[in-house]
Image (cartoon, helix red, strand yellow):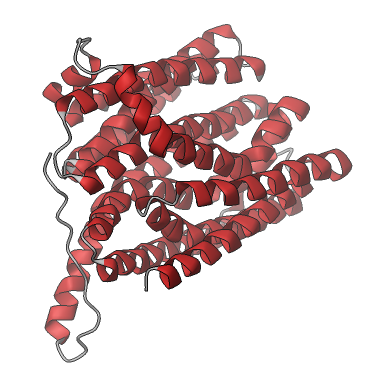
Amino acid sequence: MAGTALPRANFAQPGRGAVRRARLVHLAGRYSLSAIGPIAISGAHFAASLIFLHRLSPADFGLFSFLLVVVPFCLSVSSGLLGAPLVSAIGKSEILAEDRLAAFRKVNRVFCLGAGLVTALSMWISHAGWAPALVLGGYGAVMALRWFSRFNAYIANHPRRAAASDLVYCVSLLAGLALLIASGHLTLLSASAVLLACSVLSLPAFGWAFLRDQLRLSRQGSFAAYGPIWRDVTRWSLMGVVLSEMTANAHAYFVTFICGPKAFALLALGSLLMRPVFLVLQALPDRERAAMARFIANGDSKSAHRSVREFRCAAGAVWLGTAALSAAILTWYPQLLIRKGFDTNAVLAVVAIWGLIVAMRAVRTPEAVFLQAAGEFNALARIGMKSSFTSLAGTLLLLLLFGPVVSLGGILAGELVMMLGVVSLMRSWKQAHA
C-alpha cells in the first residue's frame, strides 16, 4: 500500500519569505482537501436541521439531532476498532499483507451490521416508530461502511476520493430534502429514506474495485488473524473511543432516554451551531494520525510535532470561524435558530456552554491524535476513564437536580478533565523521548 506523502511546512526560515508563503499555500491546500468534505457535510446537516426545526415537530427535530449523535458515535468506534489498528500496522510497514487486510474487511462487515442494529434500537427506544427506526438503522450501517472506506482512502493516499464521497452525500441530501419539501411529502420516514439513499450514493466515489473487495465474501483472512491486533492495539483504542463518547455525549443519552427527544431538542439547538468543529475534529485525525505514525516510526519527531502544531492551528481556525458565524446568526438572524416554543435565554446559554466544550476539545484533539500514533492507547484510556466518570456522574446529577440545560455542566467538567490529562501526558511523552 502506498505511503502518504504529505507536504511539510517549515516555519524556521524567516529569511525566505517566498518559500514560507509557498509552504503555507501547500499547508492550506492539505487541510482544505481534508476539511472541505466534513464542512460540506456539516453545512448539509445544518440545513437539514433547520428544515426539521421549522417544518416538523420539536420531537422529530430532537430525534434527528439524536441520530446525529448515535451515528457519529458508531463512526468513532469504527476508527478505534479498525482505523487506529490499520494506522499502527502501517506505521511499522508500508505494505500490509493481503490476509491482514482481509481480516480487517471481515471485522468491518460485522461491525457495519452492529452499527445498523445499534442505530435502529436507539431510534426505536426514542419513540421514532419501527419504520423510521429500521430505515435509519440501514443508514447507520451504510455510513459505517463509508467511514471505513474513507480512512482507507486516506491511508492509500487518495484523499480526493474521500472528499468526493462527502460532496456527493451533501449534494444528494440537499436535493432530496428540497424535493420532499416541493412535493409536500416531508415526514420523518421520508427524510430517513433520503438519508439512507444519499449514504448509498456516496459509496461509488471510493471506486468499484475497492467496494467489491469490501463487500465480497472470501476465504482470505480470518477473525483469528485479528486476535493479536485486538490484544495489542484495539482493546485500548476502542476503550478510549467509548470513554471519549461518554465524556462528550452523556447528556444526549440521559436527556433523550429520561426526558424524551423534545427535551433534547433544546440542547441540540446549541450544538447545531458548533457542528462544523465537531466534524472537522472527527475527520482530520484519520489523515493526520497516519502521517504522524510514519514520522514517529522513522524517528522524525520534529516533523511529528510540527504536524501537531499545524493541526492545532487548523482546529483553532475552524473554531474561530464557527464562533464568529454563530455570533452573527444569533445577532442578526436569530429566527433561523430560535423557533416559537424555545426560550431565547436558554438557547443562548446552551450555545455559550457548547462553545467552551468545543474549544477544549479543539485544544486536546491534536495531542490525543499524536499520542494514538505513538501507541499510547493504554494511557489515553486511563485518562478517558477519569473524564467519562466525571461526565456521567456530573451530567446525571445536574440533570436530576436542575434540568437539561444545566446538565451540560457535566460534559464541560468531563472535557476539562480530558484536556488536562492529555496535555499532561503529552508533556510526559516529550520528556521521555527528548
Quick check: can you spot residue 195? yes
Count of marks, rendered view: 0
Q: Position of residue 271 (x, y in %)?
A: 58, 46
Give the position of the N terminus as an image quadrant.
Answer: top left
Drawn side of residue 354 relative to residue 215, left or right: right
| Viewer-side residue, 75 vs 290 | 290
Give the position of the C terminus as an image quadrant.
Answer: bottom left
Depicted 203 relative to depicted 86: above or below: above
| Viewer-side residue, 56 vs 389 | 389
Place residue 431 in its image quadrant: bottom left
Depicted 400 relative to depicted 114: above or below: below
| Viewer-side residue, 364 vs 22 | 364
Report the residue at 13% width, 79% height from top: 19
Report the residue at 31% width, 31% height from top: 148
Q: Position of residue 415 (x, y in %)?
A: 62, 54
Place residue 122 in its image quadrant: top right
Report the residue at 40% width, 31% height from top: 230
Q: Position of residue 14 (x, y in %)?
A: 21, 89
Depicted 24 relative to depicted 391: above or below: below
Extreme residue toward the bottom, this view: 15
Quick check: can you spot residue 275? no
Depicted 221 relative to depicted 92: above or below: above
Report the residue at 19% width, 86% height from top: 13
Q: Position of residue 140 (x, y in %)?
A: 44, 22
Extreme residue toward the right, this view: 401
Place residue 204 in its image quadrant: top left
